[in-house]
Image: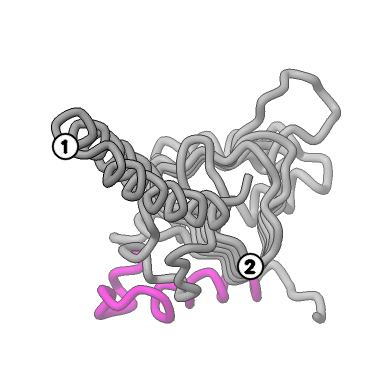
Amino acid sequence: MRDISLWGQIKEDFSQPLLQDPAINSKIELFFNYPGVWALVNYRMAHALHVKGFKRIARVIMGVSQIITNIDIHPACTIGRRVFFDHAFGVVIGETAIVGDDVLIYQGVTLGGVSLDRGVKRHPTIGNKTVIGSGAKVLGDISIGENCRIGSNSVVVKSIPNDSTAVGIPARIIEKGRDKNPMAHNKIPDINKELFIYMFKRIKILEEAVLNSHHDAKVKDDELETIYKCYLESVKE
């Protein structure tokens, strides 16, 4: 892909709400209702200064931007093209984070570090065309592959391969019920709910075993165990 100028990147940033947000009705709204766009534009300028050695000025720019937009982006991080912060309040992107092209990030997302060591990569790398749901925390020097989806409020502490969906605390890769549509947030399965359903059914079988035939309960328990094993196989570590 050819290189693009700073002005070209900023033009792309301003175009993203028009392409990705059905709520926008006018370009005027870009100036008043899209803090994520302004935070990204401020980052572009601050990052250019940071690369040229004007690190203190870059930090000042992003400090002022943080006060205005409530979005904390370190000017040293790397953010690709056509990235869109939807709503964006509370987004935090650390110093050594790398965000690929065409990434969609919702409000409250943290791309954070788990180390205090200077001079090393402490923050995650996000692959192209990945969607990170609201409130998700991606922590440490890990890699999230391309075309991935991170469920809302998930905590990711391990690398995720390409074309994966990860949910939960800590996040696990899932196969069951996966929908590749980046907007299908309502179709991400609740792995905790699945576990509670299993536990309630298991308790019911044990109660029936006490009151009725032990043989019937054993058959039902074996059937439930088979279903649960299939569920575990669909949730990868």
Task: Quadrant for residue 114, please give it.
Answer: top right
Q: Residue at point 45% right, 75% down? A: 181
Residue 17 appears left or right of 49: left
Which is nearer the eye, 4 or 112?
Answer: 112
For residue 13, above or below residue 112: below
For residue 82, above or below residue 194: below
Name of the residue lying farthest toward the top: 116
At mark 2, the secondary structure is loop
Residue 55 is one of the magenta-drawn residues: no
What is the spatial separation of the Cα atoms under label 1 and label 2, in whole angstroms? 48 Å
Q: Residue at point 50% right, 56% down? A: 230
Q: Earlier in the sequence, mark 1 or mark 2?
A: 2
Name of the residue lying farthest toward the left: 211
Q: Can residue 69 be seen?
A: no
Q: Which residue is mark 2?
A: 163
Q: Residue at point 27% right, 46% down? A: 216
Percent x, y for residue 47?
70, 49
At mark 1, the secondary structure is loop
Mark 1 Cα shell of 10 Å, populated few (<14), some (14-19), many (≥20): few
Query: Which part of the image, by quadrant, shows the C terminus?
Result: top right
Which is nearer the eye, 94 or 201?
Answer: 201
Question: Which amino acid, by three-letter code, is at mark 2?
Answer: Asp
Question: Which amino acid, by three-letter code, is at mark 1?
Answer: Asn
Percent x, y for residue 116?
73, 18
Residue 78 appears left or right of 216: right
Query: Which part of the image, by quadrant, shows the N terminus?
Result: bottom right
Q: Which residue is mark 1?
A: 212
Q: Which residues are magenta?
A: 8-31
Which is nearer the eye, 77 or 127?
Answer: 127
Residue 24 is one of the magenta-drawn residues: yes
